[in-house]
Image: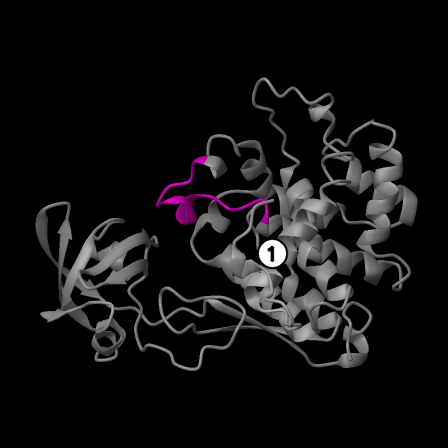
């Protein structure tokens, strides 16, 4: 793996900052792949045929499970505490739900079309596709908590992975789409058929809130600081309105990178790569955008000037209220939470 100098701690420093933590998470992720997809793998990948593309509907499992454990392993190893881990999990939940893609593509379709969609993302991808990495991680979270529930805390998903590897990985048999449901029922008397049917083959919301609550953790959706900010941390300063677009601000204006379907910028007729130069006849730049947006209220209509290539556009934009794009997780019952988290 290649990393930046800033990803590693300076000599004598013991604090794990965000850059080093991200690097450790990547190491954890790739090391976990030694078992999950390098040994235990989809049946259709046996043997690997590296001369052409390989297709499977199971990438949600092989990348999603690995993505769930990359940060969770750091937490269980004592490298990050519970609040830090829950913040990272909140980031994952927020990323999955920012945009309409999670409502339009199933995670198994995302897996199958990885070569043509996920690996070839464009500015509209958040509106059209869901990541089998991040949503797969959330499905694994639900499975881990469901298994703990149904076995009175005797079995975790880590136990399941060990047994799956022994039966389907070490033997070189490989897994099919139905393997997990059948294996959990036969080995542990755990029934996840209806859950996985919804989670994998529909775009219905996952029962994350209820499952976390049963383990002493609350999940709340809160307003983020602005259109560019969403994740697992509370935003102290919040704008009163939302553009409904991710943008890169500079001295030349706001270059739109993603325009979210059905939100203010989209309804006004703006597109990705448009560059907003003025809102309500006031210049917007990286230093003035926040000051300008703080002047307005939801449902207020303003004139927007923007360049599309070399053409000047004048459009009417009706601001929307900011969406609750942050996902904040907090331990509310330490006794329950310690059955899943390291609580000190």
Residue 270 x, y percent position in the rendering? 22, 53
Range covered by the magenta-colored residues: 120-133
Give the residue at x 74% y 81%. Answer: 333
In the foreground, 216 or 294:
294
Is 314 positioned to the left or the right of 123 in the image? left
- Judge whether 297 appears above or below 269 on screen: below
Q: Residue 205: x, y in percent?
A: 58, 56
**Colour scheme:** one colour
| Mark 1 element type | helix
Q: Is the N terminus in the top left, top right, bottom left or bottom right quadrant? A: top right
Classed neighbour count for the residue bearing mark 1: other residues with Cα under 10 Å, few (<14), some (14–19), many (≥20): some
Judged left or right of residue 112, residue 285 is: left
User: Dominant secondary structure of the magenta stretch?
Assistant: loop
Regarding residue 206, the answer to whether it shows in the image is no
Is 1 placed left or right of 262 in the picture? Answer: right
Q: Position of residue 174 (x, y in %)?
A: 78, 29
| Residue under label 1 | 23
Whole-percent x, y for residue 200 in the image: 63, 43
Residue 291 visible in rendering = yes
Does the magenta segment cover residue 177? no
């Amino acid at each position: 793996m290649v990393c930046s100098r800033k990803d590693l701690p300076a000599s004598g420093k013991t604090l794990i900052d965000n850059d080093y933590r991200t690097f450790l998470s990547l190491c954890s992720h790739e090391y976990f792949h030694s078992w999950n997809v390098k040994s235990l793998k989809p049946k259709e990948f046996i043997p690997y045929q590296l001369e052409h593309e390989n297709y499977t509907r199971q990438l949600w499992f092989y990348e999603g499970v690995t993505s769930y454990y990359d940060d969770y392993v750091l937490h269980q190893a004592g490298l990050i505490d519970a609040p830090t881990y829950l913040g990272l999990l909140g980031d994952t939940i927020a990323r999955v739900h920012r945009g309409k893609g999670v409502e339009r593509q199933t995670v198994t379709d995302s897996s199958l079309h990885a070569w043509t969609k996920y690996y070839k993302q464009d500015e509209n991808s958040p509106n059209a596709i869901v990541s089998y990495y991040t949503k797969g991680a959330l499905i694994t979270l639900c499975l881990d908590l469901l298994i703990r529930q149904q076995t009175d805390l005797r079995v975790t998903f880590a136990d399941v992975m060990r047994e799956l590897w022994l039966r389907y990985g070490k033997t070189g048999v490989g897994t099919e789409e139905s393997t997990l449901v059948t294996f959990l029922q036969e080995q542990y008397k755990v029934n996840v058929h209806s859950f996985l049917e919804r989670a994998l083959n529909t775009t219905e919301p996952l029962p994350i809130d209820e499952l976390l609550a049963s383990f002493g953790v609350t999940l709340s959706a809160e307003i983020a600081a602005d259109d560019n900010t969403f994740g697992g941390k509370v935003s102290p300063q919040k704008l009163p309105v939302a553009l409904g677009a991710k943008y890169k601000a500079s001295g030349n204006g706001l270059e739109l990178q993603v325009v979210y379907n059905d939100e203010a910028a989209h309804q006004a007729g703006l597109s990705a790569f448009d560059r907003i130069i003025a809102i309500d006849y006031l210049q917007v730049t990286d230093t003035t955008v926040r000051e300008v947006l703080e002047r307005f209220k939801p449902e207020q209509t303003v004139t927007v000037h923007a360049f599309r290539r070399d053409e000047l556009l004048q459009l009417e934009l009706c601001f929307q209220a900011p969406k609750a794009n942050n996902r904040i997780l907090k331990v509310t019952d330490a006794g329950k939470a310690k059955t899943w988290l390291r609580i000190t």
